[in-house]
Image: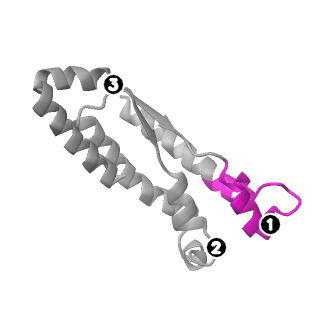
Amino acid sequence: MDGQLDNFANTRQDIISLIGASAAQELLSNAIFTVEMGQNDILNNYLVPVISILEQIVVSPQSFISTVFKRYRLQLTRLHSLGASKLIVVNSAPLGCIPYMRDVNPAAAGAGCYEYANQIAETFNAQLNSLILMSSD
């Protein structure tokens, strides 16, 4: 997301150059920003088999999510400082129901979904909700 924020900062500067700071501020204050984060972080950096088995043993899901949220807090703060005041923040889907996760996890056999991944997504969503509530104060 840092790269996306850098791109937005550059685009914001381009807008300011084209229409001026006051008009750009007005434009951004009326814009609605959609932020979707977490799913790829959880899937690609924690749940993907073989690559992360050791990490799953050493780092608890709560610890991993806590580390991720420290970064998200900074990123959302940066986005807000760049003029994004109206945000739609999307939470994580039930990751254990993604076909790939069901296929590669024997624990999902017969159950339809890999519950461990769903529990991690639920923990992520609860912390995301807390972060949003704190940010809206």
Q: CA distance from mark 2 to mark 3?
A: 39 Å
Amino acid type at mark 3:
Ala
128 is higher (above) or lower (below) than 50: above
Amino acid type at mark 2:
Pro
* Residue beneath disc 3: 31
Label whose residue precedes the other's in the sequence (1 or 2): 2
Question: Position of 38 compared to 101: left or right?
Answer: left
In the image, the segment drawn in magenta is: 94-120
Quarter occupied by the C terminus: top left
* Residue beneath disc 2: 49
Whether the magenta-drawn stretch holds residue 116 is answered as yes
Dominant SS type (magenta): helix
Q: Nearest the camera: 93 or 69?
A: 93
Q: Position of residue 128 (x, y in %)?
A: 49, 43
Element under label 2?
Answer: loop
Residue drawn 25% across the image and 22% down it: 27
> Alpha-carbon neighbours of circle 3 within 10 Å: few (<14), some, or many (≥20)?
some
Q: Position of residue 115 (x, y in %)?
A: 74, 56
> Alpha-carbon neighbours of circle 2 within 10 Å: few (<14), some, or many (≥20)?
some
